[in-house]
């Protein structure tokens, strides 16, 4: 080949390589930019939130923040000292001053205080409510989702109708959460008469995450080798016995993967629970009911809704900022803990399987 012909073959290739090299660097810079932005966000949450959740003295954890209910903060001066007291502490302090003044035959001193809403107390009811919403909705979603996946994968006759159902499921995965919230409010809260309650929140969140659970579970069922089914049939097993003993145990890791994805979405949603399950403030904990069934028909406080309220619905100040970052820190840690349990369980099940 002549030198001119060789040059004609290598020149376009060199240009393509340059373009590919530039594209790779663009993608690399974009990836690192996204990772850096995420690291800054989570780093800020962990740095500022840790200052609220942890402390330098024993027991090194802010127990009051994790075990008490949200309260207003009163900041005032008395006898040359500045006090920062929660609502309950402020009432007790004022009562003690009034009793002392009454015993001395004097008028009770007037306390000029500034009030900061939700800047004192803790977030224990919010933690409890979030756990109940996540666990209850995921149980419902997994039961309905796995059952639907089994039907679509193992029982349904593959045709146009099944393809349309699968397409509808994929479309539901892209529906905004606010739409599911309005759906739950109209169906469960108003039509069924469940009011703002745990039950309404469970079913709303479960329906919202169902597309993810169904899709992931069906793909996990399809990944199980066909030979497992044929071997079970050859031994005389029924279809359900084959599914229960030969298919589901090997598809379980993939099903748990769908639960991890579902937990990540369910725990962080604010709009659905705002319409169906969450209260800004509630005096009683969920189990403080007169009858057992009342437990399911009561609203709860939740971490994502609490973050929304303290971040956008009250005047911003230095005291509320501690609550915002502290709540966000606990929320992220709680979601990570629940997801980690699912991941560990999935790995243990997968390690015991022999393909």
Image: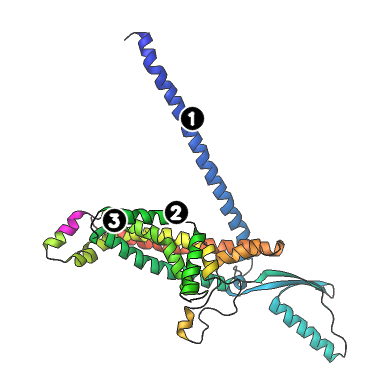
Q: Which residue: 25% across, 60% down?
A: 156
Q: Tag count in the figure? A: 3
Q: Which of 230 and 106 is in front in this view?
A: 230
Near mark 2 (Cα within 10 A), the count class, few <14, some 14-19 or many ≥20, is few
Q: Which residue position holds label 2?
A: 174
Can you tell which of label 3 and label 2 is closer to the viewer?
Answer: 3
- Disc 2 is placed on an element classified as loop
Occupied quadrant, residue 152: bottom left
Quarter holding the N terminus is: top left
Cα gap from disc 1 to disc 3, whole angstroms: 46 Å
Q: Earlier in the sequence, mark 3 or mark 2?
A: 3
Marks 2 and 3: in contact by CB < 8 Å?
A: no
Q: Which residue: 15% across, 58% down?
A: 230
Cα gap from disc 3 to disc 2, whole angstroms: 21 Å
Left or right: 234 with respect to 297? left
Mark linked to residue 161? 3
Q: Does the magenta stretch include residue 205?
A: no
Near mark 1 (Cα within 10 A), the count class, few <14, some 14-19 or many ≥20, is few
Near mark 3 (Cα within 10 A), the count class, few <14, some 14-19 or many ≥20, is few
Coordinates of residue 200 in the picture (x, y in percent) = 47, 72
Cα gap from disc 1 to disc 2, whole angstroms: 33 Å
Coordinates of residue 264 in the picture (x, y in percent) = 46, 59
Q: Is residue 265 above or below residue 136?
A: above
- Magenta residues span 224-230
Occupied quadrant, residue 209: bottom left
Q: Which residue position holds label 1?
A: 22
């Amino acid at each position: 080949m002549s030198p001119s012909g060789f040059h004609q073959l290598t020149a376009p290739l060199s240009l393509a390589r340059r373009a590919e090299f530039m594209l790779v660097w663009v993608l690399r810079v974009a990836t690192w930019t996204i990772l850096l932005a995420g690291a800054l966000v989570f780093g800020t949450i962990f740095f500022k939130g840790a200052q609220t959740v942890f402390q330098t003295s024993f027991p090194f954890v802010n127990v009051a923040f994790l075990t008490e209910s949200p309260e207003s903060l009163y900041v005032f001066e008395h006898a040359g000292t500045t006090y920062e007291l929660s609502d309950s502490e402020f009432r007790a302090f004022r009562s003690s001053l009034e009793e002392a003044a009454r015993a001395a035959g004097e008028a009770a001193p007037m306390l000029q205080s500034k009030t900061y809403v939700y800047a004192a107390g803790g977030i224990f009811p919010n933690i409890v409510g979030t756990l109940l919403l996540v666990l209850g909705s995921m149980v419902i979603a997994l039961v309905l989702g796995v059952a639907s996946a089994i039907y679509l994968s193992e029982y349904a006759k593959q045709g146009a109708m099944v393809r349309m159902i699968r397409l509808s499921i994929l479309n539901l995965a892209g529906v905004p959460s606010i739409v599911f919230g309005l759906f739950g409010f109209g169906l469960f809260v108003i039509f069924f008469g469940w009011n703002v309650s745990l039950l309404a929140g469970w079913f709303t969140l479960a329906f919202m995450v169902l597309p993810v659970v169904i899709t992931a579970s069906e793909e996990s069922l399809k990944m199980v080798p066909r030979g497992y089914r044929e071997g079970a049939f050859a031994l005389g097993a029924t279809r359900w016995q084959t599914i229960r003993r030969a298919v589901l145990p090997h598809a379980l890791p993939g099903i748990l993967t769908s639960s991890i994805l579902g937990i990540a979405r369910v725990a962080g949603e604010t709009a659905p629970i705002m319409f169906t399950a969450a209260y800004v403030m509630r005096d009683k904990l969920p189990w403080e009911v007169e009858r057992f069934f009342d437990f399911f028909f009561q609203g709860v406080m939740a971490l994502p809704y609490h973050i929304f309220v303290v971040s956008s619905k009250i005047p911003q100040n230095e005291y509320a900022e501690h609550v915002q970052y502290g709540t966000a820190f606990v929320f992220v840690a709680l979601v990570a803990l629940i997801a980690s349990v699912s991941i560990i369980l999935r790995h243990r099940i997968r390690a015991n399987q022999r393909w």
